[in-house]
Image (spheres, rainbow, N blue to C red):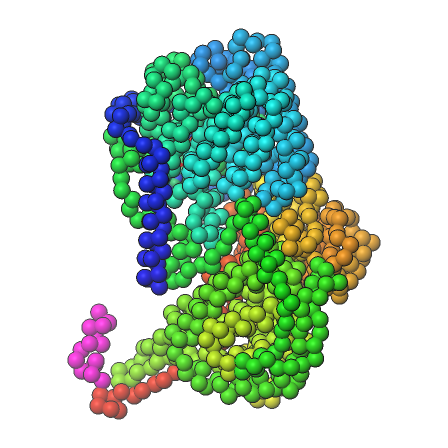
Amino acid sequence: MATEQSRSREVALDAAAADSRALRAALGETGAWRARAESLARTLVEATLDSRAPLFDVQRAFAIFPPESPAGESLFRLAEALPRIPDRPSRTAMLADRVPALRGWKAVAALPFAGLAMDAIGRQFVYAETIAGALRRAGRDASAGPATRFSFDMLGEGARTDADADRNFRRYMGAIRAMGQAVGARGAIWRERLEISVKLSSIHPRYDAASYAQVRGELLDRLKQISGRAAAAGIGLTIDAEESERLSLQVDLFEALSADPALDSWGGLGLAVQAYQPRALETVDALLEIAGRRRKRGGMPIAVRLVKGAYWDAEVKRAQELGLERYPVFPDKRLTDLSYLACARRLTGLDSVRPQFATHNPVTLACVLALADRLGGASAAPARFECQRLHGMGRGLYRTLAAMHPDLPVGTYAPVGEKRELFAYLVRRLLENSASASYVRQAARAKRPDDLLRTGFAFLDAGLSPRDLPSPTELHMPQRRIAKGYDLGDSATLAAWAKSVDEARRAWTAGSLVSGVRRPGPARPAVSPARPDVTIGEVSDATLDTARSAIDAAYAARTAWSAVSVPERAAALERLSDLLEADMAGLMALCVWEAGKTLVDAMADVREAVDFCRYYAQQAREGLGRPMELPGPAGERNVLTLHGRGVFACISPWNFPVAIFTGQVAAALVAGNTVVAKPAEQAALTAYRIAELILKAGVPPGVFHLLCGNGGIGRALVADPRVAGIAFTGSTDTARAIQRTLADREGPIVPLIAETGGLNAMIVDSSALPEQVVDAVVASAFRSAGQRCSSLRVLYLQHEIAPAVLDMLRGAMAALRIGDPADPATDVGPVIDGQARGKLAEYISDLRSRAELIAESGPVPPAGTYIAPVAFEIGSIREVPGERFGPILHVARFALEDLDRVVDDISATGYGLTMGVHTRVDSRAERIRARSAVGNLYVNRSMIGAVVGEQPFGGEGLSGTGPKAGGPNYLVRFTTERVFTVNTAAAGGDIGLLTGRMADAGT
Ligand SMILES: Cc1cc2nc3c(=O)[nH]c(=O)nc-3n(C[C@H](O)[C@H](O)[C@H](O)COP(=O)(O)OP(=O)(O)OC[C@H]3O[C@@H](n4cnc5c(N)ncnc54)[C@H](O)[C@@H]3O)c2cc1C
């Protein structure tokens, strides 16, 4: 493992070195401008250390309230949430939470002052609340600086619904109209000084790779309307850069826009490029081509705003969650800086592009200026490019720059909107500035300019040293590699996987495997839930004789397998994990066609199986392989060891056909048991494929057996007294039936490890952010068509925010696409079969008669066992008769004073699997945690997608017996404990005691 880790570190270092070499080559010779850059940088750095900044200047605020200090964290968390909380009790609670000195009446008394302070922070970042106010303010600021320009950013979250997108579109159009009127009325002042920044995610709810083919036309149409109006108004427009998976879509739309001859005479068209992406240089090259074509046919230059990028931490987190091979952003700040300059070099001195260098880093700015001087000649440079800052940041730096270069155009990115819309923007600013490598953060801590200059120029000087940031799949090294994943948010990757999965489809067959030999049995066709008219394979079910012979063989092999060393058993699991990883497309195809899983869910299922194998292998090596020496009196040795119990029956469901099947079997095997596995009838094809891989991984044929078949085969397994333990995942009713059979059985009393259902609730108070809530609700309730045991069933909303959240939920549900799971654009696939659909449809019609319909998605395809996601309003969870395994959401409202009763009602159902809480009041989350009894509680996120080793999964009460799958206590339940005691005194006394070693050891 350690060598594997160092190998992958070397690979990462090699990649970083290659990036660095390519960027250095693109940057070219630096000697000619370096000295000038250094002297300029010194002046500019000193300007940033000027202590006369206003109190809420970001850099100053960070110096006084470092973001990692409790005061800093409190300040920024209050600024994020307080302005949007509607009710006083929640505002007071949040204030008291963040400022412990303000308890009770003191918090109430302090609330108005806190409000004023938050306003001050908001004002620091928000230029004006309305476009009219922004124009008034800009008018004043423009007269102070003749080269000042403004890019207005209409604040707000990305659109979740068509209604959001329509509203944002109208806001852009309205703002441009107002800006056009300003230009018309006072052209002499405003000409070429006004611009609007547009986020594509705000004008369409489905600006993503999966939907792109369908929505490209709509997006382009909107963009053309906005651009046409901006061109007519005589203002500029820049398309902001967003998350990395949207880069290719952004460039594609920009290319289409710039190809429109109607816009050729408009010099205001532009877009932002993020230098922190390894794809930055190639993006710049693509833009130069686009710009060159436009110029060639007589069009105006395009503007390229070069930024470093604002989503670094989110990109890193996402890459780690997805297990990507490499990060979509540079992992080293010096590479970001180098990339910025290499891109600047490419963009400078051309007549087809007008670069806009957006940065608050004085070293970056100095390098850009020195480089441009060198390339364009000192006098030509200022006219050809522009420098840009964000409102509220870089004030001292840009003041000094203006004094040095009065003619250099300087743009201010000026957010316009109400304070309650500030969230996303503020969080981005806070996170980017909190990063220890960011200039603002370093300047807030720096004592001397020399330190800042040395760090600032490190990107040109320093060699690459090992990075602190492990590559995404190395996150848990040296213990284990995490499963490799791929970014299905990226259009090219998604298209490639859709193709591979399609190509992996074949006429599958499955049957029982006893001692590695396929056994005949009654055959049945397997059909896809998405297309019940299409037969996808054939399954031969086990007979009772086959079941008996599987148990015979497993029983015969149990002692020998238990004697195989733990490292050998763990190695088999690791080989299996590699085989599963290598067969990703084949297994995904099975998940899609047999279980109706979407591509994203299918990939997650395979990855989880890979993680289970590696995690249990690691756990076994650490926990099972080493005898535990126990203390005892002098002259005695006590050793505890763990052993396989014998034959384990693993009975798995269809909803995670790869992960749960593999997880159970892997745990049982590595703990030293032989296994007879019985997957759900609906998932036999997938299980058979995994069974082949288990044998291929080197698990002896006598040790693992597969039985295809229905509940009758399961019952026969459970009833056999030679079966020494059962791992079961499925319904609570079946778990009970298993328990009864076990109780009635002759022979040893054996463990049952059961993971069953849940009646899972999410509690949302008024401090939560509605957009985050709706994202989490839609994912939790409807992903996998609601067929996860962790799925959300009952959403509790605090009265004050219920109407707004429900409005947004209606819009988000209307945007869901239900259909063929093999189609990359599908959000919700079918439910597993006709029987399941029939029961769900019956329940929905019952709800229609007694509850109020909130929303229903649709349409659903005519063939296939589809149920459209649906939400009903009810009074409380007490009205829900039990788990309904499908995309049905119940919503109830609650008053804050009834919070404890809500939690008690949830507990009273007897289930205890997952729960979600959305609140910014930490003490409230804690109160709910302390009062509830659930296996997995998630705060401010979705409540599905537990990760092996990070969120061990499983419930209590009616939801399961524990221990948790993917957790540190799981394997032990598959073992039996033995203690070995030796009276060493009987064989000549205790040497330790006689030589004084024991006494020494105690001191
Ligand atoms: C006018 C203007 C418009 C903007 N528009 C956009 C936009 O459309 N889209 C967008 O994404 N951003 C935009 N930004 C924000 C911008 O991307 C930067 O986040 C911000 O300007 C800070 O960069 P800097 O050069 O000022 O500071 P610096 O402190 O020199 O650099 C900070 C940058 O380094 C990156 N970084 C931090 N740590 C590391 C690390 N360990 N490895 C690699 N990189 C690291 C950060 O993510 C950040 O990008 C805009 C900024 C301005 C001024």
Q: Is residue 754 above or below residue 331?
A: below
Q: Quadrant of ligand 1?
A: top left
Which secondary structure type mostly characterizes the magenta part of the structure? helix
Give yes or no for residue 999 being in the magenta stretch: yes
Magenta-colored stretch includes residue 446: no
The magenta stretch is 990-1003
| Residue 952 visible in image | no
**Could you tell me residue 586's position as x and y percent?**
56, 63
The residue positioned 26% from the left and 91% from the top of the image is 986
| Residue toward you, 525 or 315 | 525
Foreground pick, 308 / 44: 308
- The residue lying at 40 percent from left, 58 percent from top is 476
**Toward which corner of the image does residue 594 lie, by quadrant?**
bottom right
Residue 925, compared with residue 504, is above or below; it is above
Quadrant of the image containing the N terminus: bottom left
Q: Residue furthest right?
A: 849
- Left or right: 157 in relation to 438: right
Q: Is residue 375 left or right of residue 520?
A: left
Residue 721 sits above or below residue 954 on the image? below
Q: Position of residue 288 (x, y in %)?
A: 47, 29
Q: Identify whether 874 is placed above or below 380.
A: below
- Front residue of this view, candidates 732 and 608: 608
Q: Where is residue 252 shown, x and y percent of the image?
A: 56, 36
